[in-house]
Image: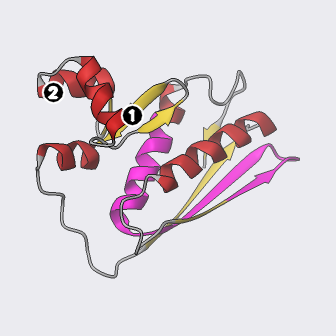
Amino acid sequence: MSKDMYSVEQVADLLGLHVRTVRGYIRSGRLRATRIGKQYRIARADLDALTGRPAPPSVPGAEVSSVVRLDGVDRAAVDRLATLVLAGVNTHHDPDRPLRVQTVHDEERHRMTIMILGDLTATADLLRLLDGVLDGGNGLLGGGEHSRG
């Protein structure tokens, strides 16, 4: 898991709070989190917003484009990853600077391509979420092997 994405337990430890308190913050909307299966993941920026720590400055008007290619991905894994990406996009902070994302599945080659265009911080957050899920396993891609191109 990326060091910029935290579990509820990690946030509770960092803040000296009970896990139930952190979950209550998430349910009430006080702390933003992304739900992956039955677990929540909290981005570093969202934790900083809760604690009042200033967010890192963004470069005005800067956008980044990213292409992520995943090999060895079946239809079920594509559906799960597309749902994860959509959830990541929907938790984006600035509605004036939305992320634009497109996913493509090449069924013959068992390949998924994810194209992301948006501001630097939001794109980095989404890429960290993907990296954490893919490196963490979580059964997201099923039993087959996968590689990132």
| In the foreground, 127 or 55 | 55
Residue 8 versus residue 58: which sits nearer the camera? 8
Residue 61: x and y in percent read 33, 82
Query: Rounded to the nearest whole Å, what is the CA distance between mark 1 and mark 2?
Result: 14 Å
Q: Is 80 colored magenta in this rendering? A: no
Residue 119 colored in magenta in the image? yes
Instruction: Check the image and tell me how it is coloured.
Output: secondary structure
Which residue is farthest front?
28
Report the disc number at residue 41: 1
Task: Give the residue type that dot 1 points to.
Answer: Arg
* Residue 121, placed above or below residue 53: below
Q: Which of 36 and 62 is in front in this view?
A: 36
What residue did someone put label 2 on?
14
Position of residue 10 measured from the top left corner of the image (x, y, whole percent): 25, 24
Q: Can residue 131 be seen in this view?
A: yes
Using the rendered view, name the quadrant where residue 15 is placed.
top left
6, 128: nearer the viewer: 6
Query: Can residue 2 be seen here?
Result: no
Write down the region rendered in magenta. Answer: 103-132
Amino acid tagged 2: Leu
**Residue 122: quarter of image:** bottom left
Q: Where is residue 84 in the image (x, y as percent from the top left)?
A: 57, 43
Q: Mark 1 or mark 2: name the one nearer the start of the chain.
A: 2
Q: Is residue 149 left or right of residue 119?
A: right
Which quadrant of the rendered structure holds the N terminus?
top left
Give neighbour class at mark 2: few <14, some 14-19, many 20+ (Cα, 10 Å). Answer: few
Give the number of the disc on residue 1: none
Q: Residue at x 88, y 47 (%)?
A: 108
Mark 1, secondary structure of its residue: strand
Horizontal side of 30 relative to 110 (left or right) equals left
Label 1 CA crowd tier, 10 Å (few <14, some 14–19, many 20+): many
